[in-house]
Amino acid sequence: MNFRIRFPERQDERVLVLSEQMTTQEALDQTFFALQDLVKPYNYLQTWGLFRSPDKRPLITMAGGDDDIPASAFFQPNSTWEAWRLKEPFTFGRAPRIVPLD
């Protein structure tokens, strides 16, 4: 299964390949490695996030850990997600304020 990650400020897009067995955490790890020059480790939803294009819905899981949630629950084949910097850490009940990654 392929999905695209778009980096709006760079006019760049990468295709990431997910296996059927891959978990959401593994997909987020793979995304981090594609972004590691722009974001720090362990800062997802604190300083940056993934938002489904075109509706800008954030990828947020409610589980204690994403190790048992299949990536296919979020990443549909050929879907596009955008990586954005958060102006402030994500808080439930408030829409995230986003800006391009530097």
Image (spheres, grey):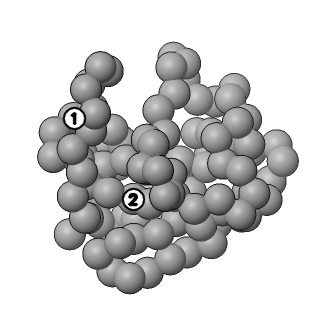
Q: Residues within 10 Å of mark 2 (few under 14, many from 20)?
A: many
Measured as percent of width and height from the top left, residue 63 is found at 55, 18
Percent of width and height locating residue 83: 39, 59
Residue tagged 2: 83
**Viewer-proximal residue, 11 or 36?**
11
Q: In which quadrant of the rendered image does the C terminus lie?
A: bottom left
Residue 82 lies, with reference to residue 25, above or below; the image says: below
Q: Name the residue rendered at 55%, 75% in the picture.
A: 14
Can residue 102 be seen by looking at this rendering? yes
Q: Is mark 2 on a helix, strand or loop?
A: strand
**In the image, 83: left or right of 59?**
left
Q: Tag 1's secondary structure?
A: loop
Q: Residue at x 29, y 20 (%)?
A: 93
Between disc 2 and disc 1, whose residue precedes?
2
Q: Which amino acid does label 1 sit on?
A: Pro
Direction bottom: furthest residue:
11
**Residue at figure coordinates x 49%, y 58% from the top left:** 54
CA distance separating discs 2 and 1: 15 Å
* x then y, percent, for residue 75: 66, 48
Q: What residue is shown at x 56% (from left), y 57% (from top)?
A: 30
Q: Is residue 31 visible?
A: no
Q: Say which mark, if any, is on residue 89.
A: 1
On residue 98, the disc is none
- Label 2 sits on what residue type? Ala
- The N terminus - image quarter: bottom right
Residue furthest front in the image: 55
Neighbourhood count class around disc 1 (C-alpha, 10 Å): few under 14, some 14–19, many 20 upward: some
Residue 10 picture location, percent across and down: 33, 80
Q: Left or right of 19: which side holds 54?
A: left
